[in-house]
Amino acid sequence: MSGSGPGPDDARASGTPPAPARRRGRPARAAAGAGPGARERILAAARTEFAERGYDKTSVRGIAKAAGVDAALVHHYFGTKEQVFEAAIELTFAPALTMPEALAGGGEAVGERMARFMFGIWENPVSRPALLAIMRSALTNDRAAAVLRGLIERRMLQRVAGELHVPDPQFRVQLAAGHLIGIAMLRYVIKMDPVASADPEEIIAMVAPTLQRYLTQP
């Protein structure tokens, strides 16, 4: 008499169908937190974790715990930590990604519109903490910087450049963006006065002509 356990032939003989093999690459339906709304919970948790802990100290396991799901579910929906970060910052940057529509058509006031658009987002107390967290992550981690750079270039700057009718439009848009990012660093990250305490309207009035020159002058 063999000491091995029952095999598939024994299961067929007894009339009991063999248990189906689990499919690879997908979490079991019984995984913790699986169900309607799981993806949205994961994304919300990722935004909070990255904002509070930064890119380096955030982990897929930590995101899963904050969302109340299994870590396998995070990998299923988003893949790697880098991909989760990209999805999270894309959601955070959603208002900024509408800039191309706001600047469409160029015109005499395009520099002012660009400055007003960006400072409107930074001055919003709802969006500012997440933007600060993304900026700090990009400054301290090469992968986070690469993700942010790709998103801004692909979804925003290339589209704005496509609306300009001047030589070297992409170079000009990057100069304008760099001008605004530098001011944002001084005002919101380093908090250097007098820029940090200046009225936003005063800053817009000062930088708009320079942005206009970048974007429109031959």
Image (cartoon, rainbow, N blue to C red):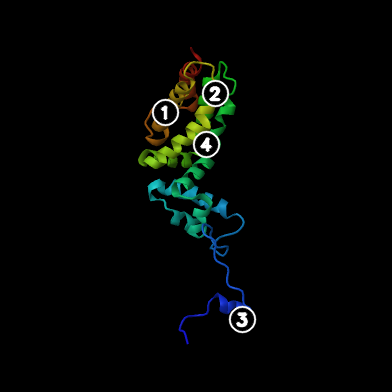
Disc on res. 14:
3
Percent position of residue 141, x then y = 37, 42
Q: Nearer the viewer, residue 26 or 162?
A: 26
Q: CA distance from mark 1 to mark 3?
A: 76 Å
State yes or no: discs 2 and 1 in contact (Cβ < 8 Å). Answer: no
Q: Which mark is residue 162?
A: 2
Q: CA distance from mark 1 to mark 4?
A: 16 Å
Q: Left of 201 or right of it: where is 102?
A: right
Residue 124 has which mark? Answer: 4
Q: Amino acid at mark 3?
A: Ser
Q: Is disc 4 placed on a helix, strand or loop?
A: loop
Give the residue pinned by disc 1.
183
Q: Is residue 95 visible?
A: yes
**Proximity of marks 2 and 3: CB atoms separated by less than 8 Å:** no
Is residue 135 at least partly visible in the picture? no
Determine whether the residue tagged by mark 3 lies in a helix, strand or loop: helix
